[in-house]
Amino acid sequence: MYPKNFQNLIDHFNGLPGIGPKLAERLVLSLYKSDTQKAEDFATALQGLHNVHNCPKCFNITESDLCTICTNTARDTSLLCALEDPLDILPIERSRNYNGLYHVLGGTVDGKKGDHLKITQLESRLQTSNINEVIIATNFTTEGDMTALFLKQRLSEMCAENNIKLTRIVRGLATGSDIEYADDLTLISALTNRTEML
Ligand SMILES: [Zn+2]
């Protein structure tokens, strides 16, 4: 049995993505052995997460009212890229091949249900702003493909009525791959060669 506070921290680490019980123990032991300042800085950094929230417009993560992409007047507001989660934005930004806006869906469809996704908010953005194209950039996994199809079914009528193109990034990314881990060239190719969803 570990001391209560030691075990408590292990329990918090355990179950985080990629972290099992053994790694959780090693991480806590490492924090315990590090100097006090380092452990305190870690605690402060963790508390700092309180200041992070979702941008009310695109659901990216931000510490301001709106995120830095939504407030950037140099962005192309006629383009909107819909993706699964905020971690997918950074690789696309790094590839420097896209200057439009984003919409974070907040996951993938669950079976045939998408009520937990920010689709209603996406629809209202499409109705109230001058967007010419929606690029669906969900991951090339079964769930990502199902979500792309779901979006197409939900949005195609509205897109046709408002003259909005609905496209999907191409499978330059290997099947089963996540945007989050794609390299710049693959992402540039996937975005540049996007195809219309008919
Ligand atoms: Zn935003």
Image (cartoon, rainbow, N blue to C red):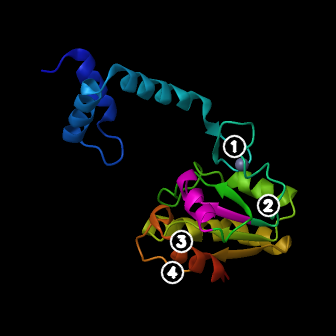
Q: Earlier in the sequence, mark 1 or mark 2?
A: 1
Q: Magenta stretch: give its range.
A: 80-95
Residue 82 is inside the magenta segment? yes
Residue extending furthest toward the top: 4
The mark lying in front, picked from 1 and 3, is: 3
What is the x, y in percent for residue 138?
55, 65
Q: Which residue is mark 2?
A: 75
Q: Earlier in the sequence, mark 2 or mark 3?
A: 2
Amino acid tagged 4: Gly
Left-right relation of 26 to 115:
left
Residue in the image at 72% along x and 69% along y: 134
Q: CA distance from mark 2 to mark 3?
A: 20 Å
What is the x, y in percent for residue 195?
65, 83
* Dot 1 beta carbon under 8 Å from ligand 1: yes
Amino acid tagged 2: Arg
Q: CA distance from mark 2 to mark 4?
A: 25 Å
Q: CA distance from mark 4 to mark 3?
A: 11 Å
Left-right relation of 92 to 3:
right
Q: Which residue is mark 3?
A: 184
Quadrant of the frame with the N terminus: top left
Q: Closer to the camera, 10 or 117?
A: 10
Residue in the image at 84% along x and 72% along y: 161
Secondary element at tag 3 = helix
Question: Are the residues tagged 2 and 3 within 8 Å (C-beta)?
Answer: no
Amino acid tagged 3: Asp
Q: Which residue is mark 4?
A: 172
The mark lying in front, picked from 4 and 3, is: 3
Left-right relation of 155 to 40:
right
Q: Which residue is mark 1?
A: 55
Residue in the image at 28% along x and 29% along y: 11
Amino acid tagged 1: Cys
